Amino acid sequence: MDLRQQVDVTEGGYDTTLQPSKTDGGKMIIPVLLENRGLKESYELWQVGFYAEDPDEGEVLFCLAQAAQAKNIPAETESPGFSVTWDFCFDISNTAPFDVVMNSVGLVNIEA
């Protein structure tokens, strides 16, 4: 499948937690945390997606990352306390301005 044509992540759709964003020069860095708390069955993670609210179209898939090899996410009973983090880097541009508004519900810092 052509990733440019995808409108949703494949299978699953488990929630991740966005950590506080930071900027570095012309880049915005958004750390993402995935935990297995409450996960009943393990699964193979292939994709992580960011969704954005388009004023004309509603919620749209803004960014899609796909792994070359799946990452096994174990059930909570297999590996209590398992988590994985990624940093997603976005170039900041004045030619196509956008606002990043993150819902702070469930937001924690990496140390927590």
Image (cartoon, grey):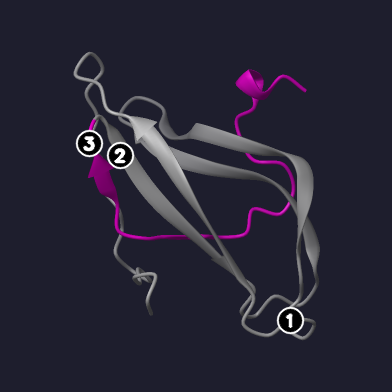
Q: Is residue 80 magenta?
A: no
Q: Is residue 4 left or right of residue 46?
A: left
Residue 23 to residue 40: above or below: above
Secondary structure type for disc 3: loop
- Residue 30 rendering spot, x and y as whole percentages: 37, 48
Q: Is residue 61 left or right of residue 78?
A: left
- Residue 13 rendering spot, x and y as whole percentages: 64, 53
State the residue position of label 1: 79
Badge 3 amino acid? Asp
Q: Is the C terminus in the top left, top right, bottom left or bottom right quadrant?
A: bottom left
Circle 2 Cα neighbour tier, 10 Å, few/some/many (<14 / 14–19 / ≥20):
some
Q: Earlier in the sequence, mark 1 or mark 2?
A: 2
Badge 2 amino acid? Met
Q: Is residue 17 magenta?
A: yes
The mark closer to the camera, 3 or 1, is 1
Residue closest to the eye, 1 or 53: 1
Q: In terms of image quadrants, where is residue 12?
A: bottom right
Residue closest to the eye, 104 or 92: 92
Question: Residue lying furthest front in this view?
Answer: 25
Q: Which mark is residue 99?
A: 3
Residue 104 to residue 53: above or below: below
Residue closest to the eye, 86 or 37: 86
Instruction: State how far apart marks 3 and 1 are (Cα).
Output: 37 Å
Prevalent SS, magenta region: loop
State the residue position of label 2: 28
Q: In terms of image quadrants, where is residue 55?
A: top left
Q: Is the N terminus in the top left, top right, bottom left or bottom right quadrant?
A: top right
Instruction: State how far apart marks 2 and 3 are (Cα).
Output: 12 Å
Badge 1 amino acid? Ser
- Residue 91 rendering spot, x and y as whole percentages: 33, 27
Q: Which mark is residue 49?
A: none
**Magenta highlight range:** 1-25
